[in-house]
Amino acid sequence: MKPRNTGWRHLVKSTHYSLRGLNAAFRHETAFRQEIGICLLLLPLAWWVGEDPVSWILLIGSAVLVLIVELLNSAIESVVDRIGIEHHELSGRAKDISSAAVMLALLLAGLVWLLLLGQKMWG
């Protein structure tokens, strides 16, 4: 039986794997790099656009949600590609559905930012 890591050792190993995953996504996924760039531009603006902690967390949270969903999309695409490169209806469906999740996260983030920016400018 494989020895299990527990406690601090588990936390350290999990953090290492997570950072490795972020690094892999940054190196291999153009969309993730683009979304990181957009976040780096938008997040400082959140302090200006938002007027209270709730609006700040909405602005920052919606931007981070896009990154989270993009990571999941990239993971699904990697697994599907690992299975095989030939076209299969279920593989295509999995990729399309995970792409749709990214699109919805982007739409949500855009709506949050537009509404709160509109409130700041004209409210």
Image (cartoon, rainbow, N blue to C red):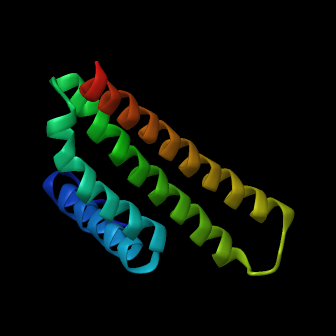
Q: Is residue 81 left or right of residue 90?
A: left
Observer-nearest of 83 and 89: 89
- Asked if one can make out residue 7 in the rendered structure from this viewpoint, the answer is yes
Observer-nearest of 45 and 89: 45
Observer-nearest of 40 and 116: 116
Question: Which residue lies at the image location 15% right of the left edge and 37% below the top edge?
Answer: 48
Of the 4 image quadrants, the one containing the N terminus is bottom left
| Corner quadrant of residue 104 | top right
Give coordinates of residue 85: x percent, y percent: 74, 81
- Asked if one can make out residue 1 in the rendered structure from this viewpoint, the answer is no
Q: Is residue 114 left or right of residue 121?
A: right
Give coordinates of residue 6: x percent, y percent: 23, 53
Q: Is residue 22 above or below residue 8?
A: below
Question: Which residue lies at the image location 67% right of the left edge and 69% below the top edge?
Answer: 80
Q: Is residue 94 left or right of residue 113?
A: right
The total number of labels drawn is 0
Of the 4 image quadrants, the one containing the C terminus is top left
Question: Which residue lies at the image location 52% right of the left edge and 64% below the top edge?
Answer: 75
Q: Is residue 104 left or right of residue 66?
A: right
Q: Residue furthest front?
A: 122
| Corner quadrant of residue 113 | top left
Q: Is residue 78 above or below residue 10?
A: below
| Corner quadrant of residue 86 | bottom right
Question: Which residue lies at the image location 38% right of the left edge and 70% below the top edge?
Answer: 33
Give coordinates of residue 59: x percent, y percent: 29, 36
Q: Is residue 105 above or below residue 119?
A: below
Give coordinates of residue 36: x percent, y percent: 33, 62
